[in-house]
Amino acid sequence: MRKFLRRESGLGLVDTLVALAILGTAAVAFVAAIGTSSITAGDVKADTTAQSLARSQLEYVKALPFDEKAHSYPSIATPDGYSISTDVSNIPTADKEIQVITVTVSRSDETLLIVEEYKLNR
């Protein structure tokens, strides 16, 4: 019976340290993945907001009366941190009945989206 008990051994110090190192590495990888996911979700939200603002601004400009001398049109209200600029240019080879509307959506001085569309005098 004594021989049998002497052969049994528990976890040694090395085994415990190896197990802790593996668990620690897995935990660090998991936390890093959560951080990356959070950053990506924020970027997607900013892009979606920029697209929605650009679309709304273009629809707003199209609904305004045509002004052949306009260099810009008023902007819609924006959420905090976002800004919209609307530039107007005439097509050189066309008559003055067509304008190119360029909408630029920015957030914290970083341009997120630039969209161009035509406005016709109808």
Image (tube, rainbow, N blue to C red):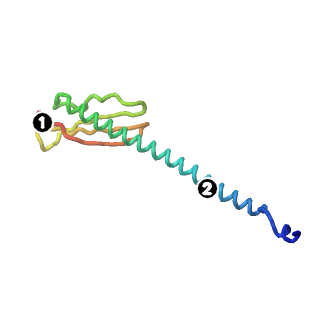
Could you say where residue 50 lies in the image, as x and y percent from the top left?
Answer: 35, 39
Which residue carries the number 2 mark? Answer: 26
Direction from residue 92 to residue 78 in the image, left or right: right
Could you say where residue 7 lies in the image, as x and y percent from the top left?
Answer: 82, 70
Direction from residue 106 to residue 20 in the image, left or right: right
Q: Which mark sits nearer the N-terminus, 2 or 1?
A: 2
Label 2 and label 1: CA atoms lie apart by 63 Å
Q: Which of 58 and 90 is in front in this view?
A: 58
**Type of amino acid under label 2:** Ala
**Circle 2 crowding by C-alpha within 10 Å: few under 14, some 14–19, many from 20:** few
Direction from residue 51 to residue 36 in the image, left or right: right
| Residue at the bottom extreme, as displayed | 3
Q: Which of 3 and 44 is in front in this view?
A: 3
Q: Residue at x 28, y 34 (%)?
A: 56
| Residue at the right extreme, as displayed | 2
Q: Residue at x 27, y 28 (%)?
A: 74
Q: What element carries label 1?
A: loop
Which residue carries the number 1 mark? Answer: 97
Which mark is in front, 2 or 1?
A: 2
